[in-house]
Amino acid sequence: MKQHGLTLCLIILVCILLVSSQVLLKLALQRAAVHSTGFLLLLTALPRLWTFWLAFASMAAAVALWVAVLREAPLSVVYPMISLSYVLMIPVARVFLKEAVTVTGVAGAVIIVLGVTVLSRAM
């Protein structure tokens, strides 16, 4: 049981890292777009931004922790739990990117949480 608790904590940490990497990447793209007009110019501008590298590091850490999760639990059980990152993204995108929160998005998040709750019982 103790091992399952650690696995769930790692999954939550993976979700947090995935969300942070995507928000940081979006912020890097927004900043790079200000200085670049074409796609190739955008790609050359990204490596100059600290938010891009922090996004990259966050994604790499998420992958490393995901490997630890996969060693301990069945993929068919833990993979759907990564959808919690969508649930977490709603408030994070609202705060950091000023994106709208919709009723549909919240309803979808509730369904995801219910599904993950059911699946977590399988662990």
Image (tube, rainbow, N blue to C red):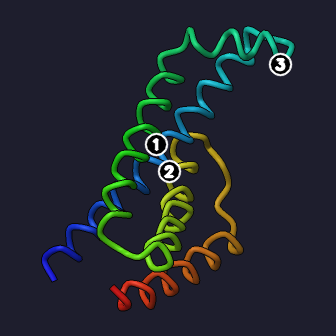
Pointer 2 local density, CA inside 10 Å: few below 14, some 14–19, many at least 20: some
User: Looking at the picture, does residue 78 appear above or below residue 40?
Assistant: below
Query: Which residue extends farthest left?
Result: 2
Looking at the picture, how far across and down is residue 113, in whole percent? 49, 79
Q: Where is residue 60 shown, x and y percent of the image?
A: 43, 37
Q: Are marks 1 and 2 in contact (CB under 8 Å)?
A: yes
Q: What amino acid type should be assigned to the residue bearing mark 1?
A: Ser
Q: Residues within 10 Å of mark 3 (few under 14, many from 20)?
A: few
Residue type at numbered disc 3: Phe
- Which residue is found at the position 49% from the left and 32% from the top? 55
Per the model, the C-alpha gap separating discs 3 and 2 is: 27 Å
Reading the image, the residue beneath label 2 is: 92
- Mark 2 secondary-structure assignment: helix
In the rendered structure, which disc, 3 or 2, sits on the residue that comes first in sequence?
3
Between 116 and 27, which is closer to the camera in this rendering?
A: 116
Q: Which residue is mark 1?
A: 20
Q: Amino acid at mark 2?
A: Val
Residue at 72% x, 16% y: name it. Answer: 43
What distance separates the C-alpha of mark 1 from that of mark 2? Answer: 9 Å
Up/down of 112 relative to 53, above or below: below
